[in-house]
Amino acid sequence: MPTTTPQRTDDPRVERTRAAVLDAAAELLTTDGPSAVTHAGVAAAANVSRTTVYNHWPTREDLLRATIDSVGKITPVLDDLSGSLRDDLGMMCEHLIADLTDDQRAPMIANMMERALHDPTVSMVRNEFIESFERVFRVVIETAVAKNELRSDIDTQRSMASLLGSFVFARFMSPDGFDRAVAEATLDEFVRINAPR
């Protein structure tokens, strides 16, 4: 069986190709939703071979994950935390708020939520992002409870659903709409109603 030589990652041509493919994939994700992010679809949009796309992202999950990262859906990490409850909540929600207030990206979120119900690949990638977010969110909540900034009986998963669900509801279902002021007020309200009594 012939051996393959791994592609060099320091070659500027390789980096340009990767960037072009991710740009094409991001455009497909934004305009047509996650179902359009396939090796064949992205290769055609980027004007490269499918083999090129497969070489960089062997599975559709890899390709979709990299595409989501490329459009700015960055999951916070523990090193980003400051220890300030309100600041950390704002930092964690910043990317979601930015996407929900952007008229091009907000429909992409709705499309991702819908596709995750029917597409196992989209569901898997969505679940990975939620799990990553929840790990950091849990630390924020536990730190705030230890500092007596939040009540001790707060449920991390329900509180995350309440906070993020409030953003999604305001953006897609409320006649009042969603903007940064609504997001900031929602974060303030979350802290207020979950404070120790």
Image (spheres, rainbow, N blue to C red):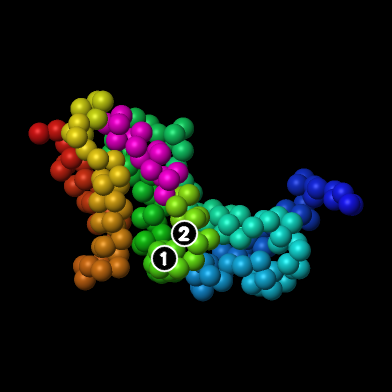
Quadrant for residue 85, please give it.
top left
Instruction: Tell me if 91 is positioned left or right of 64 in this view.
Output: left
| Callout 1: SS | loop
x, y percent for residue 122: 50, 61
Marks 2 & 1, CB-CB < 8 Å contact: yes
- Residue shown at 20% from the left, 27% from the top: 148
- Residue shown at 45% from the left, 44% from the top: 132
Is 133 magenta? The answer is yes
**In the image, residue 155 above or below residue 18:** above
Instruction: Tell me if 36 is positioned left or right of 110 in this view.
Output: right
| Callout 2: SS | helix
Q: Residues within 10 Å of mark 1 (few under 14, many from 20)?
A: few
Is 134 magenta? The answer is yes
Question: In this picture, which residue range is highlighted in magenta?
Answer: 130-144
Q: Give the CA distance from mark 2 to mark 1.
A: 7 Å
- Residue ID for mark 2: 123
- Residue ID for mark 1: 117
